[in-house]
Image (cartoon, grey):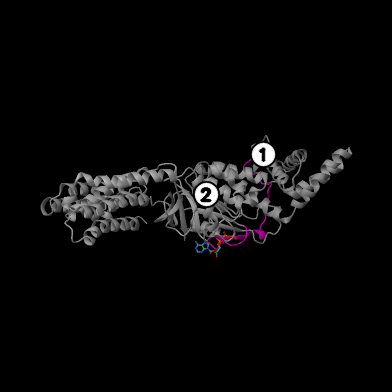
């Protein structure tokens, strides 16, 4: 942590100034031996400051801190132009080797300036001001020093920028703690949104790591302590993707987001593991009619249903077209026609009606080719003509208005499970279009997202939902053990949370996704992902453009 780093450094600086004088006690203060001892310690201090703080600017300000200490320790004989020499030599040496090892220069202080987030209030101004007045009194009337007075004034200005009023007493220390105050700039985070845990590390170019997760890279986890908020309102969409291996804490994290968020939710609970406060529906006990129109035209819905069946059973293109035509005919049998919108509200057919229509058509065909065509569709319709798909035993729009958990754990046939999920998601999409733009907030959680995304029609539907749902007030939390299936959705996702992963291909892809182009960052994430304990998350804080390690709670 910053406090420890600065504490260690200042202790070493003070020891470096005092020890030569103590060890060489017999010699006068201005003697060559004592001066040489102090010069060596200043050379070492400069190198150390660069290693610890990674910023030439901070190191230079620390030189002023050292000057202040020399002033306070009353080493008047030393305050001359020559003491600049060992310090600047040390800094040049550190910079030279730093550039060789790290290959490029980036300054921690300069990058923190980009993250300044100033929020003034009465106390963030008043408290530093009180300490500034004290400092003025001390350095003008008690211990006259223009140098220290200037330091206090700069510390005051930096404290106003950092907004850390609790650090105000440091103004009295003038230059001495100024580098610490500088390191606090840009470290205050926005505290808006849903708190899902604590940031415990930030991935930074550093010489040593302060976390037990080793990265074997120039980038290391530098300790940090702050709450982590996800601010969906401030983002371009409300979508979240959670990836991680089995038992890594994915559902735990999703539950926390929905419990703490200020929105309605609907959970597709594939394994029956969501013990949240909501209405529960045992999906094995309900029926849903996939042929419901949900405000769409019969042809459009017929195409969607045919495409869904194609995706499940791998139908050919011609079969899919035939199927869609038969479904359109089934709508016609119920008096629902493409060109008469008033009829779209009539009760829709179900798959039993489609099956009966197929039987009828079989009797009317004249060629064996036509008969084959119909017979090739029969098994699929037969499969779907179960009680589960008779009619809607629940009001699908209710699912949107209240908090619901749809428990799929007792639906054993994957194809049936899939049809139900896709049908409900289609009804949600239709609801969005019917209701129009809205400030309404609803989060839809899909556990085991690959289940839906592994089918072509499911993938296309999810892509549409991800891209369009924000303006209608909807967001999604998709949970997956594999990034493979969710990768197309990532451009429309605000947060990607990666938990413990051990599969090398997955690790490779996620490291690239979160780390970007830099090979050192990639390596750091690659090496960290398999070491994450349960509940530890690696993610990118988009607002501050930092990669962070979060402990979810
Ligand atoms: N941050 C956490 N703090 C405390 N307990 C946690 C945390 N994260 C997960 N757990 C616990 O660890 C167990 C496994 O977590 P969870 O079910 O969320 O994992 P998962 O990744 O969803 O697993 P699966 O893929 O097998 O469903 C649960 O008992 C959960 O309560």
Residue 185 point in image, percent of width and height: 33, 48
Label 1 CB sits under 8 Å from any ligand 1 atom: no
Question: Which of the marked residues, 1 or 2, is nearer the chain's N terminus?
Answer: 1
Residue occupying the point 71% across, 45% down: 311
Residue occupying the point 53% across, 58% down: 531
Question: Marks 1/2: CA distance?
Answer: 48 Å
Closer-to-camera residue (533/309) = 533
Closer-to-camera residue (293/104) = 104
Residue 546 point in image, percent of width and height: 44, 47
- Mark nearer the viewer, 1 or 2: 2
Q: Ligand 1 falls in which quarter? A: bottom right
- Residue 52 sits inside the magenta stretch: no
Q: Identify residue for label 2.
A: 523
Image-based side of 340 in relation to 517, left or right: right
Q: Identify residue for label 1.
A: 300
Note whether residue 115 is visible.
no
Relative vertical location of residue 227 with respect to residue 432 in this rendering, above or below:
below
The residue sitting at the left extreme is 141
């Amino acid at each position: 942590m910053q406090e420890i780093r600065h504490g260690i450094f200042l202790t070493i600086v003070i020891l470096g100034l005092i020890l030569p004088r103590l060890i060489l006690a017999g010699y006068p203060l201005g003697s060559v031996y004592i001066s040489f001892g102090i010069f060596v310690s200043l050379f070492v201090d400069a190198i150390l400051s660069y290693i610890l703080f990674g910023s030439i600017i901070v190191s230079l300000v620390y030189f002023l801190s050292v000057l202040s200490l020399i002033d306070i320790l009353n080493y008047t004989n030393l305050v001359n132009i020559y003491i600049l020499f060992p310090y600047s030599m040390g800094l040049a040496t550190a910079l030279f080797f730093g550039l060789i090892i790290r290959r490029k220069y980036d300054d921690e202080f300069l990058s923190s300036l980009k993250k300044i987030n100033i929020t003034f209030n009465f106390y963030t101004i008043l408290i530093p001001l009180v300490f500034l007045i004290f400092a003025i009194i001390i350095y003008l009337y008690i211990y006259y020093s223009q140098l220290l007075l200037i330091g206090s004034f700069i510390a005051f200005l930096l404290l106003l920028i950092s907004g850390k009023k609790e650090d105000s007493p440091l103004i009295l220390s003038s230059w001495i703690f100024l580098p610490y105050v500088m390191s606090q700039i840009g470290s205050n985070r926005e505290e808006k949104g849903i708190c899902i845990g604590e940031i415990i590390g930030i991935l930074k170019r550093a010489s040593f790591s302060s976390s037990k997760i080793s990265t074997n890279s120039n980038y290391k986890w530098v300790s940090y302590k702050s709450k982590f908020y996800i601010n969906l309102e401030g983002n371009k969409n409300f979508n979240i993707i959670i990836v991680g291996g089995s038992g890594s804490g994915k559902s735990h994290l999703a539950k926390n987001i929905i419990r703490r968020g200020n929105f309605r939710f609907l959970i597709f609970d594939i394994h029956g593991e969501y013990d949240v406060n909501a209405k529960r529906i045992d999906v094995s006990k309900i029926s849903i009619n996939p042929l419901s129109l949900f405000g769409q035209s019969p042809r459009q819905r017929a195409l969607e249903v045919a495409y869904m069946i194609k995706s499940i059973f791998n139908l050919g293109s011609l079969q899919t077209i035939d199927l869609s035509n038969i479904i359109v005919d089934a709508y016609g049998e119920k008096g629902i026609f493409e060109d008469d919108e008033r009829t779209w509200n009539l009760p829709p057919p179900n798959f039993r009606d489609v099956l009966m229509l197929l039987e009828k058509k079989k009797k009317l065909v004249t060629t064996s080719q036509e008969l084959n065509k119909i017979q090739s569709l029969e098994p699929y319709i037969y499969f779907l003509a179960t009680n589960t798909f008779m009619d809607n035993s629940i009001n699908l729009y209710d699912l949107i208005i209240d908090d619901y958990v749809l428990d799929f754990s007792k639906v054993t046939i994957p194809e049936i499970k899939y049809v139900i999920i896709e049908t409900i998601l289609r009804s949600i999409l239709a609801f969005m279009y019917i209701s129009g733009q809205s400030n309404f907030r609803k989060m839809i959680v899909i556990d085991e997202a690959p289940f839906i995304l592994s089918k072509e029609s499911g993938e296309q539907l999810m892509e549409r939902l991800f891209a369009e749902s924000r303006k209608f007030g909807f967001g999604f939390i998709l949970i997956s053990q594999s990034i493979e299936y969710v990768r197309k959705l990532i451009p429309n996702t605000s947060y990607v949370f990666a938990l413990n992963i051990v599969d090398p291909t997955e690790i490779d892809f996620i490291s690239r996704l979160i780390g970007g182009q830099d090979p050192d960052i990639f390596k750091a994430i690659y090496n960290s992902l398999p070491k994450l304990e349960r509940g530890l998350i690696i993610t990118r804080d988009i607002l501050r453009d930092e990669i962070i390690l979060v402990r979810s709670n």
